[in-house]
Amino acid sequence: MVEGFKTKLRHGQTVTVINPDHPNPSLVEFLGRLSVDAVFVDCEQGSADVETVENMGRAARLAKLTSIVRLFSSEDWVIERYLGRGMDGIVIPRLERSEQAAQAVEAVRYCYPRDAEQKIVVVQIETRPALETLNEFLRVDGIDAYFIGPVDLAKDLGFAGDFRQAEVQEAIDGAIATIRDTGKVAGILVDRDNVRRYVDRGVQFLYTHVNEYLTYGAEEFTRLLPES
């Protein structure tokens, strides 16, 4: 599962990464029947506890999905605790310095000295300092993808989370280009309105929410119904 995920990234292909939104192993198992490459369990903003993460990771393995967990902290003990629940990789949010990213990679190597390469490490670029020192982040070895957090980046840039503002879009596009120019993998939050735009710009790590999937399906189903 992990090797297939990494192989797609190495070959320039896109991966679809879904946040299940609800701390439910059964939902994760069902996502394995869809065109999904990985589940993204959110422990930064979501409600999943450690035991639930472990069960969602089990469900992902049964469904042959790659499992990634977004942590609430980049501290070594947090990385070890959540990787120890059987997850395939981690997402580290709210970074401001490349040294933090390097420390996270070293924590993974400490936990798995023989097979750290089989773990996925994603760092989020979502603060002004991280954006301004992006080239330093890109020099850190062992990072599989650089995920741009548009909402938090827009907040940090002074736009109250409105990532559709022209200045924020320009910053995002510039970051994507910088990541791609160094041969690294760029990722971002997508929806049906912008996914093609970002794919055309070379984004490979395509992150979205299962709630979006449900909404799209509900809207399509409603269109099939006779008008009342």
Image: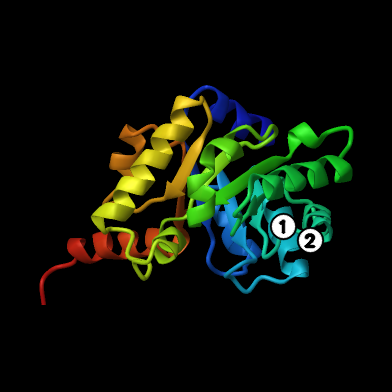
Residue 202 figure quarter:
top left
Residue 74, disc: 1
Q: Position of residue 227 (x, y in %)?
A: 10, 71
Q: Position of residue 11 (x, y in %)?
A: 52, 22
> Closer to the observer: label 2 or label 1?
1
Q: Callout 1, which amino acid?
A: Ser
Whether the residues at callouts 2 and 1 have beta carbons within 8 Å, the answer is yes
Q: Residue furthest left?
A: 227
Residue 6 figure quarter:
top right
Q: Position of residue 119 (x, y in %)?
A: 73, 39
Q: Position of residue 196 (x, y in %)?
A: 29, 40
For label 1, the SS is loop
Q: Is residue 64 left or right of residue 109?
A: left
For label 2, the SS is helix
Q: CA distance from mark 2 to mark 1?
A: 7 Å
Residue 140 figure quarter:
top right
Q: Is residue 4 left or right of residue 119?
A: left
Instruction: Give the crowd class for mark 1: few <14, some 14-19, many >=20 residues within 10 Å.
Output: many
Residue 78, disc: 2
Q: Residue at x 60, y 40 (%)?
A: 137
